[in-house]
């Protein structure tokens, strides 16, 4: 006897209003035509089909289409997996590329199987094919690539993902503890590595690693993959200070690569330079003044005179930024205030009448943790001392009176003294605003090296979008294969967002526009974001009026929400076909 569950009927399509013999059916359209335009230019469905495993017998929904539905949803609504069916039912099925039956088949398990298929697919080859299509179709430059990583935190035990495992020929990463960039050392994590092009901040590569993997061990494999994507080793690789190890730098340099990075504070070259700063032996030369949109100077950069080199022989530039100096002062002041507050609370606790803290070693460890946490170990002097405390007790029981005798007892109580080291703070101020950059490209001037690195914050913006706009939360998935698949879906989402922003800004440049009236009340927006564009188109719907005659509904009228002047302007700048929204 078959135990197969009967298939569920497809959900109601769109929203429905009825009166007499007429039915008005409405579907959300929103920014779907824009998103689909970019997905078609990416040839995403064909690339996914070519690199994913063959469809299994249970598949009512093609794996590639299921992943594209997930991409559309994350960009437009960010519904959880279990909410995809209800979300899709409100949208035009044609724009989703689904039949009503396929919409009815959407559920979290089916989409989860799509993510599992993505994990078992040829992901490196898939990303390679996708980015090559990006370069061909959108003419994205790959001459300067920026790399960084972040951590994705997890709540729960995840016992099946405690270590790396081989699953059908693929290695799953370990969800475990490591250095948390979210400042949550109590949570397990994965490491998410992302590389962007300086041309529009377009993502070109991503990789997921175990949560306890050190950043400095990821760069060589990452750089090798980027060489395949770029088709050459002669691109400028920009990364944070974890790149600067003898092995990493020599690996790239000896293979014809170029790099720019920040010198870590642990290097001897850093210590020696800051000692020269303390002696006033550094000469600074004007380099560049950065101005805002109104032409006001917001930062002044100077560069240290002289020819500085690393022990490995690579060029070392030392810079000073007035804006960074102000930030360093404010940051140090804030850290000192918070550290002093914590020490004051600890001091009050030790001096309380019923204080029982007598373990000097444990208290010293607590103090060191506070100073280390706020990075003020060298700026605050702390001393644990034992001070005598007098107490008095009646010699005999009874109510005290004029002739009552008291016994004085003296005991030692642990106490805390602390003070800010003014001289140490003054010495630290001499290094405010100073930062070093390392490069092996002798053709780069000090200004060119600085400008190359100044684009590095773009990758921080993508990570911010990942954790805020998209609220990446793979914690709802327990299978590490599906988690890694989802993080690769987010890579595609970031790619579409970046291309949308890049194409719109290029369209504005072609049209000679500095702003678009995207803010409330038509206020100008100089740097339109994908989220701002998506929100603009959210009210757009498609309506169908059906008249029932002899029990058979007949479509009598079809209409789409009238577009605004801003809608039409955006569509022109993006070069979307005129019929993308029905004419």
Image (cartoon, helix red, strand yellow):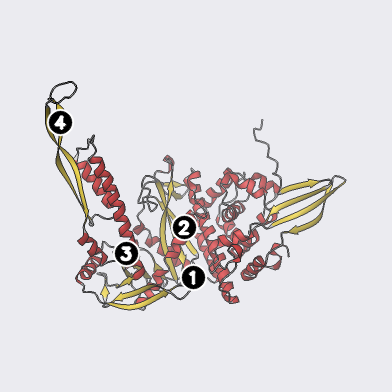
Q: Tell which circle, 1 or 4, labels the residue nearer the N-terminal end.
A: 1
Indicate which label's residue lies in the foreground, 4 or 3: 4
Q: Tell which circle, 2 or 4, labels the residue nearer the N-terminal end.
A: 4
Q: In this view, does 257 lie to the left or right of 386?
A: right
Mark 3 neighbour density, 10 Å: few (under 14) some (14–19) many (20 or more): many
Q: As rendered, which of 495 and 208 lies closer to the eye? A: 495
Q: Tell which circle, 2 or 3, labels the residue nearer the N-terminal end.
A: 3
Mark 4 neighbour density, 10 Å: few (under 14) some (14–19) many (20 or more): few
Indicate which label's residue lies in the foreground, 3 or 1: 1
Can you name the residue that lies furthest to the top here?
A: 398
SS category of the residue bearing label 1: loop
What whole-number distance in Å separates the C-alpha atoms at marks 2 and 3?
Answer: 25 Å
Which of the 4 quarters of the picture holds residue 277?
bottom left
Residue 254 visible, this orientation: no
What whole-number distance in Å separates the C-alpha atoms at marks 1 and 2?
Answer: 19 Å
SS category of the residue bearing label 4: strand
Q: Tell which circle, 4 or 3, labels the residue nearer the N-terminal end.
A: 3
Q: Residue at x 24, y 61 (%)?
A: 425
Q: Tell me the quarter of the image containing the N terminus.
A: top right
Indicate which label's residue lies in the foreground, 1 or 4: 4
> What residue does disc 3 label?
244
Q: As rendered, which of 284 and 105 lies closer to the eye? A: 284
What whole-number distance in Å separates the C-alpha atoms at marks 1 and 4?
Answer: 77 Å
């Amino acid at each position: 006897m078959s135990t197969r569950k009967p298939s569920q009927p497809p959900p109601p399509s769109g929203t429905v209003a009825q009166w007499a013999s007429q039915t008005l059916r409405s579907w959300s359209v929103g920014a779907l035509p824009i998103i689909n335009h970019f997905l078609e230019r990416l040839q995403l469905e064909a690339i996914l089909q070519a690199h994913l495993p063959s469809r299994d017998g249970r598949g009512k929904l093609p794996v590639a289409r299921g992943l594209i539905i997930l991409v559309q949803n994350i960009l437009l609504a960010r519904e959880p997996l279990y909410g995809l069916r209800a979300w899709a039912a409100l949208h035009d099925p044609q724009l989703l590329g689904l039949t009503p039956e396929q919409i009815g088949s959407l559920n979290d398990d089916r989409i989860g199987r799509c993510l599992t298929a993505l994990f078992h697919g040829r992901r490196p080859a898939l990303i390679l094919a996708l980015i090559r299509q990006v370069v061909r179709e959108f003419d994205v430059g790959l001459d300067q690539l920026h790399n960084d990583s972040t951590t994705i935190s997890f709540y729960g035990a995840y016992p099946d993902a405690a270590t790396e495992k081989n699953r059908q020929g693929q290695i799953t990463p370990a969800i475990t503890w490591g250095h948390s960039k979210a400042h949550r050392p109590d949570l397990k994590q994965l490491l998410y590595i992302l590389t962007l092009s300086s041309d529009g901040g377009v993502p070109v590569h991503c990789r997921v690693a175990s949560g306890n993997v050190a950043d400095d061990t990821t760069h060589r494999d990452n750089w090798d993959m980027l060489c395949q994507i770029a088709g050459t080793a002669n691109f400028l690789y920009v990364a944070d200070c974890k790149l600067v190890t003898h092995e990493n730098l020599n690996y790239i340099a000896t293979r014809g690569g170029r790099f720019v990075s920040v010198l870590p504070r642990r290097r001897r070259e850093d210590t020696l330079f800051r000692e020269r700063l303390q002696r006033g032996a550094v000469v600074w030369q004007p380099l560049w003044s950065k101005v805002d949109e109104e032409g006001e100077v917001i930062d002044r950069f100077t560069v240290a005179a002289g020819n500085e080199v690393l022990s490995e022989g690579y060029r070392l530039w030392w810079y000073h930024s007035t804006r960074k100096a102000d930030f360093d002062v404010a940051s140090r002041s804030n850290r000192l205030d918070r550290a002093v507050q914590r020490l004051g609370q600890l001091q009050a606790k030790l001096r309380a009448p019923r204080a029982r803290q007598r373990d000097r070693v444990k208290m010293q460890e607590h103090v060191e943790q506070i100073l280390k946490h706020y990075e003020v170990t060298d700026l605050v002097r702390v001393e644990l001392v034992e001070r005598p405390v007098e107490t008095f007790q009646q010699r005999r029981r009874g109510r005290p009176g004029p002739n009552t005798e008291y016994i004085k007892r003296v005991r030692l109580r642990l106490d805390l003294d602390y003070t800010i080291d003014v001289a140490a703070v003054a010495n630290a101020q001499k290094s405010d605003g100073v930062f070093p950059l390392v490069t092996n490209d002798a053709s780069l001037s000090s200004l060119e090296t600085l400008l190359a690195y100044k684009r590095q914050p773009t990758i921080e913006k993508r990570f911010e979008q990942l954790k805020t706009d998209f609220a990446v939360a793979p914690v709802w998935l327990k299978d590490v294969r599906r988690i890694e698949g989802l993080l690769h879906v987010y890579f595609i989402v970031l790619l579409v967002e970046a291309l949308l922003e890049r194409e719109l800004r290029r369209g504005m440049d072609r049209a000679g526009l500095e702003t678009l009236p995207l803010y409330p009340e038509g206020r100008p927006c100089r740097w339109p974001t994908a989220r701002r564009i998506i929100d603009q188109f959210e009210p757009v719907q498609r309506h169908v009026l059906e008249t029932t005659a002899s029990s058979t509904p007949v479509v009598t009228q079809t209409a789409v929400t009238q577009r605004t002047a801003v809608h039409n302007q955006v569509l022109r700048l993006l070069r979307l076909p005129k019929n993308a929204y029905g004419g």
